[in-house]
Image (spheres, rainbow, N blue to C red):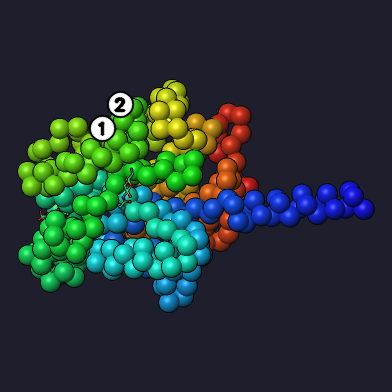
Amino acid sequence: MATIRLFCLVVLSTFLWQHVIAQRIVAVGDLHGDLFRTMTILKFSGIVDDEGHWAGGDTIFVQTGDIVDRGDDTIKLYQLIQQLQEEALLQGGRVVSILGNHEVMNLSGDWRYVSQGDIRSFGGVEERKKSFAPEGWIGRDLMEKNLTAKVGTSVFVHGGIHPSFAQDGIDGINLKTRQTILDYVESRGRFDPHKVFGGHGPSWYRGYALEDDSICSVLDSALELLGADRMVMGHTVQRDGMIHTRCGGKAVLIDIGISHVYGGHFGSLEIVDDELTAIYRDGRRRLLVDRKAKLVHQEL
Ligand SMILES: *[C@@H]1O[C@H](CO)[C@@H](O)[C@H](O)[C@H]1NC(C)=O
Ligand SMILES: *[C@@H]1O[C@H](CO)[C@@H](O)[C@H](O)[C@H]1NC(C)=O
């Protein structure tokens, strides 16, 4: 009898741990102006319902930047994120939206990757400029956003955080961003004393995605400085449309080329505790890490 009770207790506490205590995180990478694919992914990941409203309960939804550019749906995507930010709070959930290098490029007035359809959707160049200006409906929001966020034991960032930035800690990086972003915008990208918006900064750095495995020790020191178990990054397109891990699962690469401009792949990353799962249109695959720190896909 006592053993049965103990067994029930163990089952119950395991259940509670998985369903109540461990908060579910769902993350998506670069969206680049593709509303259709974004919506499809959010639906099969349990973040929105068929009408496009928050259905994630207390899930924390993280978007790692580059909502804008290349595709045409800038307006609808920023509206969607703002709407979900409000709706999530009512259910105890949260939306974390991070600046990508394309948001930052716009900040400095670099419109090289803006599509004609995007400009038309705003009603012309002047209208678009107004929306993105620091007091415009998109600009105002961007000026508030961070370059990085720590959720649970994971750090989320668009490009990657090199130890030279990690030494400031998450709050330090975000503080420097907040202190300089307006001058950065107004100087059209010239004023960047801490180089937080620069090519080696958190929204541009690609070392953890592209360099050989010796980069893993660099990542280790960055994670130690940040007090985190892993870094989840967008920015560097995984051409096969799959989420990949490196360095024994400490680097998670989630830019799978969602936008039709990059192949139009569907997928998100789910983190519950230390369990990482890729959610694709055709099902879930647990991201396992073997001793050689190579990714193994296991069908669930
Ligand atoms: C985006 O670019 C436009 C045009 O260069 C600029 O006026 C605007 O200030 C930029 N966005 C933000 C958020 O500052
Ligand atoms: C930015 O990050 C700081 C901590 O680093 C946090 O206090 C603040 O709420 C964040 N802002 C947004 C808009 O997420």
Coordinates of residue 117 in the picture (x, y in percent): 19, 67
Q: What residue is disc 1 on? A: 200
Residue drawn at x 14%, y 53% is 111
User: Which badge, 1 or 2, is on the more N-terminal residue?
Assistant: 2
Disc 1 from disc 2: Cα separation: 9 Å
Pinpoint residue 198: horizontal percent, then vertical percent: 20, 36
Q: Residue at x 63, y 52 (%)?
A: 18
The secondary structure type at the circle numbered 1 is: loop
The foreground one among 72 and 252 is 252
Q: Residue 39's image quarter? A: bottom left
| Element type at mark 2 | helix
Q: Which amino acid is tagged 2? A: Ser
Residue shown at 12% from the left, 71% from the top: 123
The quarter of the picture where residue 84 lies is: bottom left
Q: Which image quadrant shows ligand 1?
A: bottom left
Residue 34 is situated, as x and y percent measured from the top left of the image, at 32, 63
Q: In the picture, which quadrant includes the C terminus?
A: bottom right
Residue placed at 54% from the left, 53% from the top?
Answer: 23
For label 2, the residue is: 164
- Residue 3 in sight here: yes
Asked whether the viewer can see residue 212, the reply is no
Q: Amino acid at mark 1?
A: His
